Amino acid sequence: MPSERAAPTPAPAEPLPPAGHADVRIVTASPETARRVAEVLRHCFDSTEQRSYPAGRGGGTRLHLTVDTTHPAEPARSWLVASRASAADRPQDDEV
């Protein structure tokens, strides 16, 4: 008689950020690179304090922050206005 296996339980979904906010995760080989990318985002949007974690056994850094897209600064403001009705709203092939 074949044994019945229970389907794996999916991991609980992370809570969604508030409306108008986006959680950003940056994964790099170097903490300095992650900080540079986060700095650019902070120049464009209000954001929370960044949180940094190891990115795995091989080293690297994973940095998390939440940006407030309802209060964009330049250059993000003009980019957001220009991209509102673009194809960027569709999921990309490499998105899960």
Image: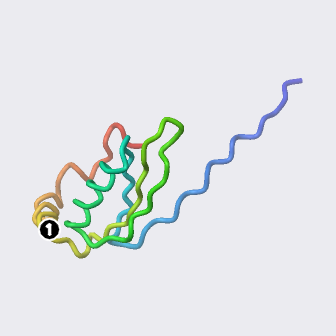
The residue that label 1 is drawn on is 77
Residue 27 placement (x, y as % from top left): 39, 46
**Front position in the image: 96 or 48:** 48
Query: Residue 64: which quarter of the image?
Result: bottom left
At x 17%, y 53%, the residue is 86
Colouring convention used in this rendered image of the protein: rainbow
Q: Position of residue 75 (x, y in %)?
A: 12, 64
Give the percent coordinates (x, y) of residue 3.
Answer: 84, 29
The residue most toward the right is 1
Q: Is residue 93 left or right of residue 61?
A: left
Could you tell me the amino acid type at mark 1? Arg
In the picture, which quadrant includes the C terminus? top left
Horizontal arrangement in the rendering, residue 48 relative to residue 16 (left or right): left
Left or right position of 34 against 14 = left
Residue appearing at x 13%, y 65% in the figure: 81
Q: Secondary structure at mark 1?
A: helix
- Quarter of image, res 50: bottom left
Tell me residue 58's x, y (percent).
49, 35
State the residue at coordinates (27%, 73%): 46
Position of the N terminus, as image quadrant, is: top right
Q: Residue 67 or 32: which is nearer the viewer?
A: 32
> In the figure, residue 67 lies in which quadrant?
bottom left
In terms of depth relative to the viewer, which is nearer, 24 or 16? Answer: 24
Give the number of marks.
Answer: 1
Residue at 43%, 68% (x, y): give it. 17
Categorize mark 1 by other alpha carbons within 10 Å: few (<14), some (14-19), many (20+). some
Eyeballing the image, is 8 above or below 39? above
The extreme top residue here reads 1
